[in-house]
Amino acid sequence: MTPTLVRHDLPHPGPGLRVDLSARARDWSEIQERMLVPLYDTVHERLEVGRGTRLLGLGCGSGLALLMAASRGATVTGVDHSPERLALARTRLAPDSWGTRTRAGSRVVEGSPRDAAGAETPAYNLVTAFEPIGCLAGDSEGLGELLAEATPLAARGAPVVLAGWGPPERCATSTVLRVATRLADPLRSTGSWRPSLRDDLEEVAHRAGLRPDGSGRVACPFGYADADSAVRGLLSTGLFDAAVAATDQAQVDKELAEALHPYVRRDGTVWMPNVFRYLIARVP
């Protein structure tokens, strides 16, 4: 849960935490990112993404949502702060990659939305922020900063899509994420788990000067081939970094595996039902 299951712009691990960022990006791309495909597809369908769509993806990560939009004919631009994930996104969006011909002008940019602007760049008519908020305390603050830079690049009336976790009782993964908070104590003053609130997305939209114009819910179950894949996928989000810094990697791996145990099925696969919410807001 995107930077990963939530914000991709979470800080890089500190100097005391040794992480193979390239391996983590691959785990995100190959294991975790696909869990949000139902969300991407539902939004693209509802907003009729296709030829004529000029999409700006905030926190685009390794680019799966961009690829799905490009396959519908959209011209896409993605921004992110992770060079490792962006390298994977560029490969995905290369012409004829995966049998999908991307539109001319599709690109990914390291940095912020401001870095995607240019005198010759047409106004975007769709902005997406698919990384769900409502998982970490304060995660909406980073989203607000992104929107402040992105909305001036969008056309008047353009839809801006925000995403968030559903109610904890409908998100099995919320019980697993509590492991990160418990192990990270006393570092939990920042980046601690919190349950999502019903009006989280609306509050972000209002603070950004956007006008809410519809919402929906999407089932996004997290399914993994085995417990090891589940651990790797969840660690790829970066949400457990504070817990690793406070204890050690072996302890986090052990307790994460134990928290996943109720969701391991008889065939060894892991299945966690979740519901995500999205909000469509409009640029004034």
Image: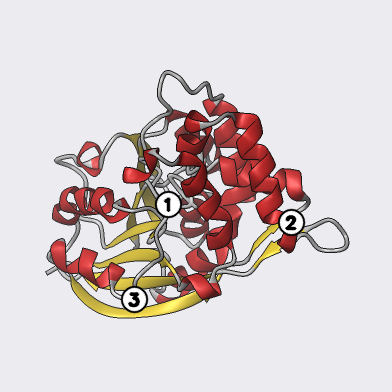
Residue at point 29%, 68% (across, down): 200
Q: Is residue 252 left or right of residue 245?
A: right
Residue at the extreme top: 15
Q: Which numbered tag is attached to residue 6?
A: 1
Q: Which residue is mark 3?
A: 198
Q: Nearer the viewer, residue 89 or 24?
A: 24
Q: Is residue 134 left or right of residue 123?
A: right
Mark nearest the camera among 3 and 1 is 3
Q: Nearer the viewer, residue 167 or 1?
A: 167
Q: Is residue 8 left or right of residue 252?
A: left
For disc 3, the neighbor class at 10 Å (few under 14, some 14 to 19, many from 20) is some
| Above or below 78: residue 85 | above
Instruction: State if disc 2 and disc 1 touch (CB < 8 Å).
Output: no
Residue at the extreme front: 186
Instruction: State if disc 1 and disc 3 touch (CB < 8 Å).
Output: no
Look at the numbered disc 1 and give the secondary structure of its residue. loop
> Where residue 132 sits: x, y (%)?
41, 59
> Where residue 227 sits: x, y (%)?
75, 49
| Above or below 147: residue 218 | below
Give me the C-alpha separation between circle 1 and circle 2.
Answer: 23 Å
Residue type at the position of mark 3: Arg
Mark nearest the camera among 1 and 2 is 2
> Where residue 228 sits: x, y (%)?
74, 43
Residue at point 39%, 59% (across, down): 194
Residue type at the position of mark 1: Val
Look at the numbered disc 2 and give the secondary structure of its residue. helix
